Image (cartoon, rainbow, N blue to C red):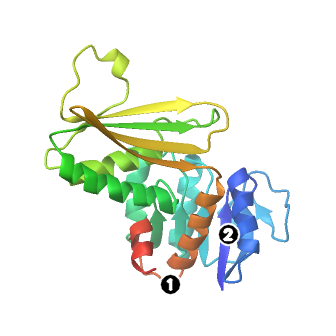
């Protein structure tokens, strides 16, 4: 049994995670962490990890980048693995996460969906075959409440592609401000915000007289919640290090 604490427990994703765990027999929620501490289930919710009533086996974080310092501090002090599913981290915070992985197990990915991680793998294979002949553009769509743009997933996909290319590309986020022809060594990223779109990511490989598109659509946020719970169960017995979906899939 994996005892899990949910950071961001009172938010939409926190509630979805709690519901998913309630329907599994290999894990349970021992507590939640949130600024809203009114409990909606049979576990307590506290406003700080230092106030957790019992030490969990793993913490799942679906909250906000501002909670990172307190979470990592608690986890490193108490030797608690953490699944980080929050997006919107800056470069300094990302390095902070990687540093923490030297002392505790950390599962960190910009997207917990199995489908998105398959999309990244397919994109890497396509990029290796098409390099130099096709331009690469990424279009991402999310709901109108999402703050960060481009999405962390779009950046993850671009990084996966770039790691595969022999000639590394720069990222162009705001093409209307660039009064010049598109170069061969760039990946364009475009963000759309509207309505209740859960998440759509399309990678476009545009060549001469032909276009190849790879696309993933998330129709419910539960796909991310399921992935985070699977990651927590996976992480419980791991040694310190930085883990991602590829590591979990390799053991499946």
Nearest to the observer: residue 100 or residue 248? 248
Nearest to the observer: residue 129 or residue 154? 129
Question: Label 2, label 1: how many angstroms apart (C-alpha)?
Answer: 16 Å
Does 85 sit above or below residue 149?
Answer: below
> Residue 78 in the image: x percent, y percent?
56, 75
> Residue 86 in the image: x percent, y percent?
55, 53
Does 195 sit above or below residue 230?
Answer: above
Residue name at image x 50 percent, y 84 percent: 237
Nearest to the observer: residue 205 or residue 20? 205
Residue 205's image quarter?
top left
Q: Is residue 246 left or right of residue 113?
A: left
Q: Is residue 112 left or right of residue 223?
A: left
Rendered image: mark on residue 5: 2
> Residue 47 in the image: x percent, y percent?
73, 57
Secondary structure at badge 2 equals strand
> Residue 239 in the image: x percent, y percent?
42, 81
Secondary structure at badge 1 equals loop
Residue name at image x 62 percent, y 39 percent: 197
Residue 171's image quarter?
top left
Does 175 sit above or below residue 78?
Answer: above
Q: Is residue 84 left or right of residue 97?
A: right
Of labels 2 and 1, earlier in sequence is: 2
Residue linked to disc 1: 237
Whether residue 120 can be seen here:
yes
Residue name at image x 61 percent, y 44 percent: 198
């Amino acid at each position: 049994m994996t005892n899990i604490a949910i950071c961001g427990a009172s938010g939409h994703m926190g509630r979805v995670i709690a519901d998913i765990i309630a329907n599994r027999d290999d894990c349970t929620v021992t507590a939640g962490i949130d600024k809203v501490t009114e409990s909606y289930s049979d576990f307590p919710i506290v406003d700080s990890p230092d106030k957790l009533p019992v030490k969990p086996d793993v913490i799942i974080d679906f909250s906000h980048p501002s909670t990172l310092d307190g979470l990592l501090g608690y986890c490193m002090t108490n030797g608690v693995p953490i699944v980080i599913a929050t997006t919107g981290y800056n470069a300094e915070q990302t390095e902070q996460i990687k540093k923490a992985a030297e002392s505790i197990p950390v599962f960190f990915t910009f997207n917990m969906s199995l489908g998105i991680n398959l999309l990244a793998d397919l994109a890497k294979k396509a990029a290796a075959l098409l390099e130099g002949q096709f331009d690469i553009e990424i279009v991402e769509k999310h709901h109108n409440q999402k703050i960060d743009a481009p999405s962390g997933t779009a950046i993850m996909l671009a990084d996966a592609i770039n790691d595969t290319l022999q000639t590394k590309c720069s990222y162009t986020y705001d093409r209307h401000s660039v009064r010049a022809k598109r170069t061969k060594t760039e990946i364009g990223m475009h963000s759309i915000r509207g309505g209740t779109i859960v998440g759509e990511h399309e990678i476009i490989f545009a060549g001469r007289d032909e276009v190849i598109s790879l696309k993933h659509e998330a129709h419910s946020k539960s796909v991310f919640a399921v992935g985070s719970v699977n990651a927590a169960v996976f992480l419980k017995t791991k040694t310190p290090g930085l883990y991602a979906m590829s590591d979990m899939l390799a053991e499946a």
